[in-house]
Amino acid sequence: MAEKPKLAIYWAASCGGCEIAFVNLHERFLDAAAAFDLVFCPCLLDTKRREVEALPDGSIAVTLFNGAIRTEENAEMARLLRKKSRLLIAFGSCAHEGCIPGLANLSGTDQLLRTVFLDNPTLDNPQAILPAAISPVPEGELTLPPLLDRVRTLAQVARVDYAVPGCPPEPERIWEVVETLARGGELPPPGSVIGAGTLSVCDDCARKKGDKRVERIYRTFEKCPEPETCLLEQGFICMGIATRSGCGAPCPDANMPCTGCYGPPEGVADQGAAMASALGSILDPGDCRGLNEEEIAQRVASLVDALPDYAGTFYKYSLAGSILGGRVRR
């Protein structure tokens, strides 16, 4: 019997949702297992790092790498799996664009540690102990991988062949990718996004679209959306207009605005900038005749003040991979 191609699934700074989405292939998971030899997956197998290191370079056919690069260990594993894999795929939004962990780039690592371990009101830490790279204990030394200065995407530390977007990717799209890889189907040029569309979520969304003029921005708890009208036209910040299609628009279908997890559409370099531009073109400050520039600016500011967190809204999933990068300036 011919040896099956090897598959690795690895998680870095992530929540585990991408693994759950993969298992949500349901009975197709058995088809994937029949097509590939799963050799490395920390949440399913007890394969050790040294065993991966012992594999010949390029012996893993495909690695689905999910999670952002937050620690030195994350970066080391990314480079190791790049070396051992013929195809390295950024699997899910964290690996692709940094996702929620990437919002940490708005703060320095010292500030993050202080917030989590010292200033959190639910903590009892009278000795103000912070995690250390090396901690002596009676049995020897305990080590933790140091935090990097900022969260990076997978492509910022290793060459990536393809990206599968989503937080997490939809199982149907995962299967399309796995099936194509299993049968040796034709893939787009390296660097492409696979398992997704090329247009925007608006093209997947069945809601009725009309004249987009927004007189007020609402947060989701402030009113119940109408079930059939475009959410953006109702004043809710729906990122669908600046987000890649392919998910099937499940959030708008459930009466919730798209938050942008599939990243920017084809040809859009920066999702947050695209959304800010789109929003700027549809905000309606009302009749401004007779007002000076300062008064008009104040009206516009009063509209956007309804957004409590610009970065967390426009760059919720994409800050680390955006043109901003989220670098803290002191």
Image (cartoon, rainbow, N blue to C red):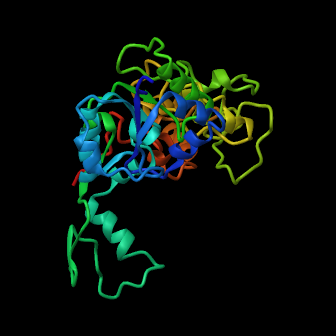
Residue 124 location, quadrant = bottom left
Residue drawn at 41 percent across, 51 percent down: 42
| Quadrant of the rendering where the C terminus is positioned | bottom left
Q: Nearer the viewer, residue 262 or 58?
A: 58
Residue drawn at 58 percent across, 49 percent down: 306
Q: Nearer the viewer, residue 327 or 213?
A: 327
Q: Nearer the viewer, residue 49 or 194?
A: 49
Residue drawn at 28 percent across, 50 percent down: 49
Q: Of all residues shown, which one is farthest toward the front? A: 1
| Quadrant of the rendering where the N terminus is positioned | top left
Q: How many marks?
A: 0
Q: Is residue 289 visible?
A: no
Q: Is residue 244 visible?
A: yes
The picture places residue 247, in percent across and down from the top left corner, at: 61, 30
Q: Is residue 106 above or below residue 126?
A: above
The picture places residue 13, in percent across and down from the top left corner, at: 38, 51
Q: Is residue 77 above or below residue 174?
A: below
Q: Of all residues shown, which one is farthest toward the right? A: 227
Residue drawn at 43 percent across, 75 percent down: 120
The picture places residue 147, in percent across and down from the top left corner, at: 26, 57
The picture places residue 246, in percent across and down from the top left corner, at: 59, 25
